[in-house]
Image (cartoon, rainbow, N blue to C red):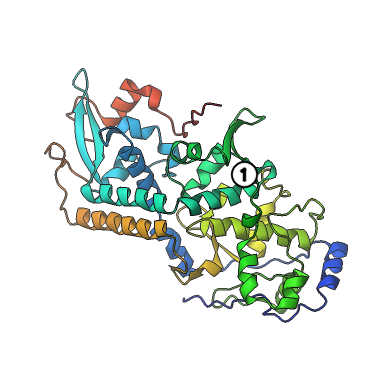
């Protein structure tokens, strides 16, 4: 079904009179017990499905490109598996061989005759990678600003690198941002040792010009002057066609929209977490967080560990279920992905970051490889001319060593599904 969006723009409900009354009412009553149903949105589900393999493939391209010879054996790639979010039962070499338009397979020999698969990149993939580096360089100011704004949302302007690494793909940060970006801005960022002995990234100075949310920027154009002064900003809301919002829920939503908007960049310690006013602030935090991502979406697990950094109450992610007109939760690809509805028209992202355009081109290259592979156009390893069957993951029973033997026996020290802790000098 084609999704129908009813955008409730700022001032659109016409219920902004008595805003202060709504504020007092909510502080007396607390959270209203309203549960809205989840309705499938095929268009937004398609957005998630289309990018299923894109992140893992792009990370592998970055890792291979950063090596001196732009070619790495499988055991070197295996130590990064935890960052790829691949299914546990899917071998890494099987995944790589799915995309012969991006990865080129060759082999190297070790002592004892062990034959180990190695992977490099096709010229087309290398060209896209270098174009991405140029785009990142050209948009360096935008990248730094978004990273600053993310840290400004947090307590102490600090995030653990482990948490930031989970968001770097969505934020459009380069794979090696810790070395290629942060050291070039010592006046803005610093690596610190956290109380739990992890490494964190700290923002050194507050930028008042950046402490304006996207909703506030939009309201400066759309909002009536008197509503802007009152601070009762409403979120754009849209529902999938056939959602069937009940009258009781609609009345609650209208009243909720009239509540004062608390900027995610302002102190909210005075708000009672048991009230709708506090909930609206939480919605505002995630609305702004998704606005900072280049695809306007992220996996739910990426934000689950942000409770303490963002100073949020327990079960804060329940706002995604309570506000399906603002957020859509896609359950495709064996995960839950939170998508900002207003950013999409059906499957189309309304405002595309230059990095998004490059990733879409890369996704087309991946699909081309899948199609060509299904036609049997890749029967040989282009690196050494050895006959291989692209549908069989093992090199052969008559080989002196399989991929697993080369990984587990020869290079067991690299057998880890967890991303390496960055080696940062403090």
Q: Image quarter for residue 361?
A: bottom left
> Residue 127, relative to residue 325: is it above or below?
above
Q: Is residue 172 above or below residue 229?
A: above
- Return the x and y of residue 286 as percentages of the image width and height: 62, 57
Indicate left or right for 199 with 352 as reference.
Answer: right
Q: Which residue is mark 1?
A: 305
Q: Quick check: 44 left or right of 316? A: left
Q: Nearer the viewer, residue 330 or 179?
A: 179
Q: Nearer the viewer, residue 84 or 398?
A: 84
Please report the residue visible at 11 percent of the width from the left and 39 percent of the height from the top.
385
Q: Is residue 6 left or right of residue 275?
A: left
Label 1 sits on a secondary structure element that is: loop
Tell me residue 219's x, y (percent).
64, 71
**Which sits in the foreground, 293 or 301?**
293
Residue at 80% in and 73% down: 19
Residue at 43% x, 30% y: name it. 416
For the view shown, which residue lies furthest in the bottom direction? 14
| Front-most of residues 416 and 104 | 104
């Amino acid at each position: 079904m084609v999704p129908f969006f009813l955008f409730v723009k700022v001032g659109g409900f016409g219920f902004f009179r008595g805003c202060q009354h709504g504020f007092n009412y909510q502080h007396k009553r607390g959270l209203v017990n309203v549960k809205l149903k989840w309705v499938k949105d095929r268009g937004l589900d398609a957005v998630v499905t289309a990018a299923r393999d894109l992140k893992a493939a792009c990370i592998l391209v970055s890792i291979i490109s950063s090596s001196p010879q732009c070619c790495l054996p499988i055991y070197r790639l295996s130590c990064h598996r935890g960052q790829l979010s691949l299914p546990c039962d899917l071998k890494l070499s099987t995944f790589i061989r799915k995309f012969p338009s991006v990865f080129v397979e060759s082999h190297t020999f070790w002592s004892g005759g062990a034959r180990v698969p190695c992977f490099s990149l096709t010229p087309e993939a290398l060209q896209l990678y270098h174009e991405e580096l140029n785009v990142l360089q050209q948009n360096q100011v935008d990248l730094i600003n978004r990273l600053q704004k993310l840290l400004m949302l947090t307590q102490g302007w600090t995030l653990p690198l482990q948490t930031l690494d989970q968001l770097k793909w969505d934020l459009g940060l380069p794979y090696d941002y810790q070395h290629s970006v942060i050291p070039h801005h010592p006046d803005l960022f610093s690596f610190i040792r956290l109380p739990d002995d992890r490494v964190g990234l700290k923002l050194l100075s507050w930028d008042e010009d950046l402490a304006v949310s996207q909703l506030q920027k939009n309201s400066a154009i759309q909002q009536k002057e008197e509503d802007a002064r009152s601070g009762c900003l409403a979120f754009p809301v849209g529902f999938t066609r056939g959602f069937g919002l009940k009258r009781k829920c609609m009345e609650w939503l209208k009243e909720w929209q009239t509540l004062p908007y608390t900027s995610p960049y302002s102190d909210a310690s005075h708000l009672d977490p048991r009230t709708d006013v506090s909930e609206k602030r939480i919605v505002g935090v995630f609305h702004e967080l998704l606005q900072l991502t280049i695809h306007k979406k992220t996996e739910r697990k990426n934000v689950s560990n942000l409770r303490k950094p963002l100073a949020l109450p327990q079960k804060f992610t329940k706002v995604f279920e309570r506000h399906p007109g603002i957020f859509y939760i896609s359950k495709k690809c064996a995960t839950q992905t939170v998508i900002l509805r207003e950013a999409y028209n059906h499957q189309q992202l309304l405002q595309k970051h230059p990095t998004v355009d490059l990733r879409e081109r890369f996704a087309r290259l991946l699909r081309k490889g899948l199609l060509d592979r299904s036609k049997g156009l890749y029967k040989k390893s282009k690196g050494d001319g050895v006959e291989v069957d692209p549908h069989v993951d093992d090199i052969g029973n008559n080989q002196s060593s399989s991929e697993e033997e080369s990984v587990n026996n020869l290079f067991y020290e690299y057998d880890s599904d967890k991303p390496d802790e960055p080696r940062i000098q403090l």
